[in-house]
Amino acid sequence: MRRFLAEFKDFINKGNLLAIAVGFVVGGAFSGVVTALVENVLMPIVAIPFGEPNFDTVLVLTVNDAEIRFGAFLTVAVTFMSIAFVLFSILKVYNRATGAVAAAPPSEIGLLTEIRDELRAQRGSGGAD
């Protein structure tokens, strides 16, 4: 049992897991902020021509007593696209500020060359053949 707890402690204390947890929490909070922006700022602007602050009740098709509420879907799609646009904008600003450039993944030949060079370095330093 002691070994199990030690392994669990090591697992929890790994840097990547903690970074993912923090990112998840911050992402959830950020999503709330952008959703509030969309619902309280963007959608009221949309209400100017349509007369409603969202499409939920405006775009409804009734067929044989069945309501097809594609306006509700459109409202959620607008919210999603707004969140995606804000995230994209933030990442563009961040990358420009930090000079970060998305690196292309190494080619197969590049990976094989790195492996070969590493093996040669190990042999030269007295590593196992």
Image (tube, helix red, strand yellow):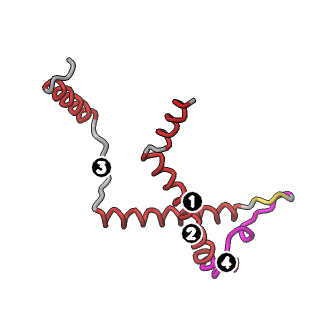
Question: Residue 124's spot in the image, x, y percent?
Answer: 13, 25
Name the kind of residue labelled 4 in the image: Phe
Residue type at mark 2 is Val
Nearer the observer, 44 or 64: 44
Q: Are marks 4 and 3 in contact (CB under 8 Å)?
A: no
Q: Which mark is residue 20?
A: none
Compared to residue 97, the image places residue 14 above or below, namely above
Q: Which residues are magenta?
A: 44-64
| Comes first in the chain, label 4 or label 3 | 4
Instruction: Identify residue for label 4.
Output: 50
Of mark 4 and mark 1, the one earlier in the sequence is 1
Left or right: 71 in relation to 6: right
Asked if the stretch drawn in magenta spans residue 24, the answer is no
User: Reading the chain from its start, which is encountered first: label 4 or label 2?
Assistant: 2
10 Å crowding of disc 4: few (<14), some (14-19), many (20+)? few
Residue tagged 1: 28
Which mark identifies residue 103? 3
Q: Residue at x 31, y 43 (%)?
A: 105
Query: Distance between the Cα atoms at labels 4 and 3?
Result: 45 Å
Q: CA distance from mark 2 to mark 1?
A: 9 Å
